[in-house]
Amino acid sequence: MSDQQPPSRFAPQNQTTHERLSTNTVGLVALSDFRKRRAEVLEQQEREARNNQLPSSASNTPTQDRSRTGTPNVASDTSDAERQIKKKKQKKPKGVGNKLSFAGDEDEDDGEELGPAVTKKAKDKDGGKTDDKSKKMAGKLVANSAVGVVPRALTKAALRKEAAEREALRKEFLVLQAAVKATEIAIPFVFYDGTNIPGGMVRVKKGDFIWVFLDKSRKVGAELQVGGEKSANARRDWARVGVDDLMLVRGTLIIPHHYEFYFFIMNKTMGPGNHRLFDYSAEAAPTPTEDGPAETASALSSKVTQTDIRLLEGASDDPTMTKVVDRRWYEHNKHIYPASVWQEFDPEKNYENQIRRDQGGNAFFFSK
């Protein structure tokens, strides 16, 4: 005998879609599996409905009231299933992947529950890029709209014109620079060997090197026979002295031979005590060609050489600010004041607020 029990006469013969899904689906399943099972259940219901309708139409028996007998209306269930399939096709969002579902809600379509989250995620994924792109484009448009002048395209003619203008400016600067370097100045100085020995005044140009000034001061020392009280033949001793044997000390700074006066004048280099190291103007001397007729270069140079040195710029400076020192004397006495506070000029160093100290690190309590 068979172990199967006959179905109860009070139980409905046809189960609804919800009941069949509940029976076949247990626990958490993937959304794709759940839809696959629901489609199978719906197909099975349609087959059963067709099988049940064939005998009834052939026998032409009156249809019983299913609400009284308790038998479920299969046709209505089938039509409901078809409507749900059409509803799902309309509401199913694009790009839905494998999701987990409790497979318990058939009254409301799963796309309605999962749809908003999935739709929001899809919008965030796709629409976010669109929003970012639109913002960037809007920012570019705003930035470009704020540009007042649109740069013009440079043609070959425009490039040649700019090059010609730059070359004209360069030549103009070189002419001005040569005029400034050719301007003469007067530098009063003293010879120093522990005491100040008057040396007179030397005429140099702003473009001359320091060694040019030292060479001219050496000739002045030979003419004045400086140091004659110590040597019977001072002129011969000065003839043996070379430019490398002399030093220029401006204030407390030893100026190297290879620097030009033009370097300190144009840079307005500051020395100790917040004073300019060489306080000369950075402009060329006025020429007399503005009011009178043009003069040749030779005539102009002869006028400059005949100019009284006392009328040149710098003639009224303090001679003790510029010292010409014998290097051999400095090497023997550099540990004694004032040679102990002398230091070689460094263009990278700031001397404006420097505190003067001796070799032992002791500060001097005077301004100069």
Image (cartoon, rainbow, N blue to C red):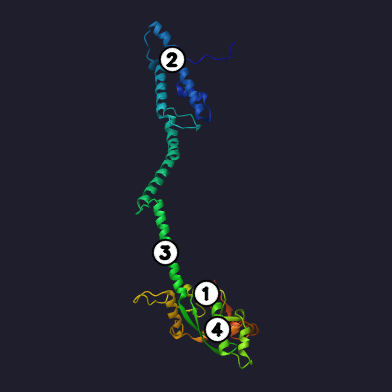
Pointer 2 or 3: first along the chain: 2
Q: Position of residue 196 (x, y in %)?
A: 56, 89
Q: Which residue is mark 2?
A: 49
Label 4 secondary element: helix
Along the viewing direction, whichever of 317 and 8 lies nearer the viewer: 317
Numbered disc in front, either 4 or 1: 4
Label 1 secondary element: loop
> Disc 4, disc 1: CB below 8 Å?
no
Q: CA distance from mark 3 to mark 4?
A: 38 Å
**Amino acid type, callout 2:** Ala
> Disc 2, disc 1: CB below 8 Å?
no
> Disc 3, disc 4: CB below 8 Å?
no
Q: CA distance from mark 4 to mark 1?
A: 16 Å
Pointer 2 or 1: first along the chain: 2
- Crowding at dot 4, Cα within 10 Å, few <14 / some 14-19 / many 20+, comes out as many
Q: Which mark is residue 169?
A: 3
> Disc 1, disc 3: CB below 8 Å?
no
Q: CA distance from mark 2 to mark 1?
A: 114 Å
Numbered disc in front, either 2 or 4: 4
Q: Which residue is mark 1?
A: 260
Pointer 4 or 1: first along the chain: 4
- Crowding at dot 3, Cα within 10 Å, few <14 / some 14-19 / many 20+, comes out as few
Q: Quadrant of residue 345?
A: bottom right
Q: CA distance from mark 1 to mark 3?
A: 24 Å
**Amino acid type, callout 3:** Leu
